[in-house]
């Protein structure tokens, strides 16, 4: 729940179905573990998508797509109204997010395919991000903690 000290709503997958959806405003969206692909929707506002290493299992590395984010705003630069962010925690030192390729235009955005490499497990996870402005992620769009 948002308050004056924490202006972000924390959203988690309480149903266990691998799908999370933000609300209007600024959200912290915790990416769930899912059998198959986990889906995340930020909605309006400045959303932070929280990737926790503990949410991934070795079987996720075998999936074609471990996570799909359907509406990333502000990729590759700053936007006055919609600046989303990827927060990676618990991954090994030197872990990385690498752009593999640009995909098709889908509705109101462009698909980008990334590989998340965890140096602690030496596993790769595939992530698809639908960029609302058509740009790939850039510096300032994500960080490892």
Image (tube, rainbow, N blue to C red):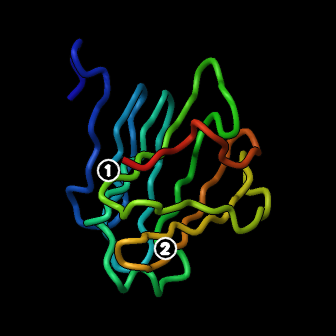
| Residue 93 found in image quarter | bottom left
Marking on residue 125:
2
Tell whether label 1 touches label 2 (CB within 8 Å): no
SS for callout 2 = strand
Q: Determine whether, in the image, residue 72 is placed left or right of residue 17.
A: right
Q: Is residue 122 above or below residue 144?
A: below
Marking on residue 70:
none
Q: Determine whether, in the image, residue 49 is placed left or right of residue 15.
A: right
Q: Is residue 113 above or below residue 141?
A: below
In the rendered structure, which disc, 2 or 1, sits on the residue that comes first in sequence? 1
Marking on residue 30:
1
The quarter in which the N terminus is drawn is top left
Q: Which residue is located at x 29 percent, y 43 percent? A: 11
Q: Which residue is located at x 75 percent, y 44 percent? A: 135
Q: Which residue is located at x 70 percent, y 58 percent? A: 111
Front residue of this view, candidates 140 and 69: 140
SS for callout 1 = strand
Q: Position of residue 104 (x, y in %)?
A: 79, 63
Q: Position of residue 136 (x, y in %)?
A: 71, 49
């Amino acid at each position: 729940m948002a308050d004056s000290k924490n202006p972000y709503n924390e959203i988690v997958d309480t149903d266990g179905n691998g799908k999370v959806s933000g609300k209007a405003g600024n959200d912290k969206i915790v990416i769930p573990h899912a059998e198959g692909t986990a889906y995340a929707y930020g909605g309006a506002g400045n959303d932070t998508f929280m990737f926790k290493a503990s949410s991934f299992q070795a079987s996720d590395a075998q999936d074609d797509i471990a996570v799909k984010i359907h509406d990333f705003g502000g990729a590759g630069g700053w936007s006055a109204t919609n600046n989303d962010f990827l927060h990676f925690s618990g991954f090994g030192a030197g872990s990385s997010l690498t752009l593999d390729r640009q995909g098709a235009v889908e509705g109101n955005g462009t698909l980008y395919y990334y590989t998340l490499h965890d140096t602690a497990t030496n596993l790769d996870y595939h992530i698809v991000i639908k960029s609302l402005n058509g740009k790939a992620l850039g510096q300032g769009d994500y960080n490892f903690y």
